[in-house]
């Protein structure tokens, strides 16, 4: 069975400071990895994902994540955060079901709070 | 293109009452999912549907039933609501069969069972 661990439930960061949100996963097979973001009172939106190829993936709003197979990690980073980054961030790993279908296993989420 | 829509946005039920949460997508996606989100537990899969006419159980199916009415719509029914079903429910859809295809989420339904 696959699992995802997000060790930090809450991360407060000053505006314009760097941030790292940690994600570790366990899986016996090759996986696809995702970061989703949930802004207050909204659904989840895809932030970025790793499928294959370059282990560093980037989003359009300055976040990046690096897939590290040996450490089974997929940490999310941003060099300088803004107030608008305040949200909850979920790491997820995909699991193949049947007939090409997949399900996502989510971590428990990290609430990022930006301090002005 | 509205994406994934859910109704209602909010609902309060008494223990034992029944209700159906509605979900529709206009992206011509094959797969649809129902998740529940509880504080400190992330999202957990309740049921999913790989295609019209098929449904399968996820991690936490007890107390729920689903119907894939057509390719667009996937409803979740609580036959006899319990306080443990107080949660935020999200519907999602996924288009292709390629590994790693993105799941698109609706805005959620916040359900309280008294």
Image: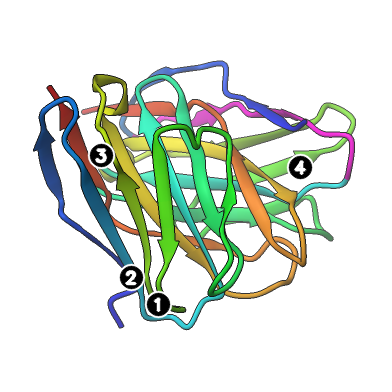
- Residue where numbered disc 2 is placed: B24
Residue A64, position in %: x, y?
A: 59, 47
**Distance of label 1 from label 4 (alpha carbons):** 34 Å
Q: Which is nearer the eye, B111 or A34?
A: B111
Mark 2 Cα within 10 Å, few/some/many (few <14, many 20+)? many
Q: Are marks 1 and 2 in contact (CB under 8 Å)?
A: yes
Q: Which mark is residue B61?
A: none
Q: Nearer the viewer, mark 3 or mark 1?
A: 1
Q: Nearer the viewer, mark 1 or mark 4?
A: 1
Please report whichever mark, 1 or 2, sits nearer to the chain's N-terminal start.
Answer: 2
The answer to whether marks 1 and 2 sit on the same chain is yes
| Chain for numbered disc 2 | B
- The residue sitting at 40% across, 72% down in the picture is B69
Q: Nearer the viewer, mark 4 or mark 3?
A: 4
- The residue sitting at 32% across, 63% down in the picture is B23
The answer to whether marks 4 and 3 sit on the same chain is yes
**Distance of label 1 from label 2 (alpha carbons):** 5 Å
């Amino acid at each position: 069975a696959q699992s995802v661990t997000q060790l930090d439930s809450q991360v407060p960061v000053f505006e314009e400071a760097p941030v790292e949100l940690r994600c570790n996963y366990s899986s016996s097979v090759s996986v696809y990895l995702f970061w989703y973001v949930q802004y207050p009172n909204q659904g989840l939106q895809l932030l970025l994902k790793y499928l294959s190829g370059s282990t560093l993936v980037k989003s359009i709003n300055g976040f990046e994540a690096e897939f590290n197979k040996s450490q089974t990690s997929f940490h999310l980073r941003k060099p300088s955060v803004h107030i608008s980054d305040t949200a909850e961030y979920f790491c997820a790993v995909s699991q193949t079901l049947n007939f090409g279908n997949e399900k996502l296993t989510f971590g428990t989420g990290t609430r990022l709070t930006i301090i002005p | 293109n509205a994406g994934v829509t859910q109704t209602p946005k909010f609902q309060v039920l008494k223990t034992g009452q029944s209700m159906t949460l509605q979900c529709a997508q206009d992206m011509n996606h094959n797969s649809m999912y129902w998740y529940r989100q509880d504080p400190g537990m992330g999202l957990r899969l309740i049921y999913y549907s790989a295609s019209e006419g098929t449904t399968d159980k996820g991690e936490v199916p007890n107390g729920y039933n689903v119907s894939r009415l057509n390719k667009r719509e996937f409803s979740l029914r609580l036959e006899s609501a319990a306080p443990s079903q107080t949660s935020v429910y999200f519907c999602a859809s996924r288009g292709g069969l390629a590994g790693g295809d993105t799941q698109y989420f609706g805005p959620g339904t916040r359900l309280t069972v008294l």
